[in-house]
Amino acid sequence: MPTYVNPNACNACAEEHLGPLCVYICPNDLMALDTDANKGFNQEPQLCSECYACVKLCPQDAIHVRGYSDFVPLGASVQPRRVDNGLTWTVTFRNGKVLEFTYPSRSTPIGSSDPYRNFTEDPAADLKGQGLAGESLWLGVDSLPTVQSGK
């Protein structure tokens, strides 16, 4: 099933003055406004690259998507929706089982993020080592052990 807009849920982003947000975010210009129905729609579903940009921006959770086979098995459906500071993906399997996964998304204003906040390492010095960015933070230690030469 290609990406499509549920016309019963779409209100053409009534609270926005620009019209449907999906129209402005789609990198392939596939989303459009049906002026007769005043609803957004995917005018070329077969060309959709399924980047989910429209899904992440839709305030009405009106856009349904095809799940990638690496996380949604054949016959299952997926419905992402925005929640506070993230996205929740609801996967409904063929047998009726439903699982939900919530992932965080941007929680700071654009331009205000500090990618190295709370890292104990020196980002410039770390470029010379083999450690991963923030490794000590994720491991819960103040510093990473180092190899002592000559012992």
Image: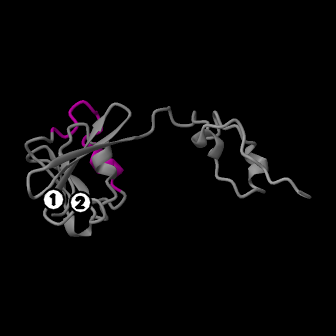
Which residue is farthest right?
150
Image coordinates for residue 65, horizontal then vertical, percent? 21, 56
Residue 74 appears in which quarter of the rendering?
bottom left
Give the labeled residue for mark 2: 72
Residue 111 appears in which quarter of the rendering?
top right
Give the labeled residue for mark 1: 76
129 or 25, nearer to the observer: 129
Instruction: Look at the image and give the residue range highlighted in magenta.
Output: 11-26
Image coordinates for residue 66, horizontal then vertical, percent? 21, 60
The amino acid on which the numbered mark 2 sits, given as a three-letter code, is Val
Q: Assess whether residue 15 is covered by the magenta stretch.
A: yes
Tell me if 144 is positioned left or right of 12 in this view: right
Chief SS of the magenta region: loop
Q: Are marks 2 and 1 in contact (CB under 8 Å)?
A: yes
Image coordinates for residue 16, horizontal then vertical, percent? 28, 33
In whole angstroms, how far apart are the C-alphas of marks 2 and 1? 6 Å
Tell me if 82 is positioned left or right of 139 in this view: left
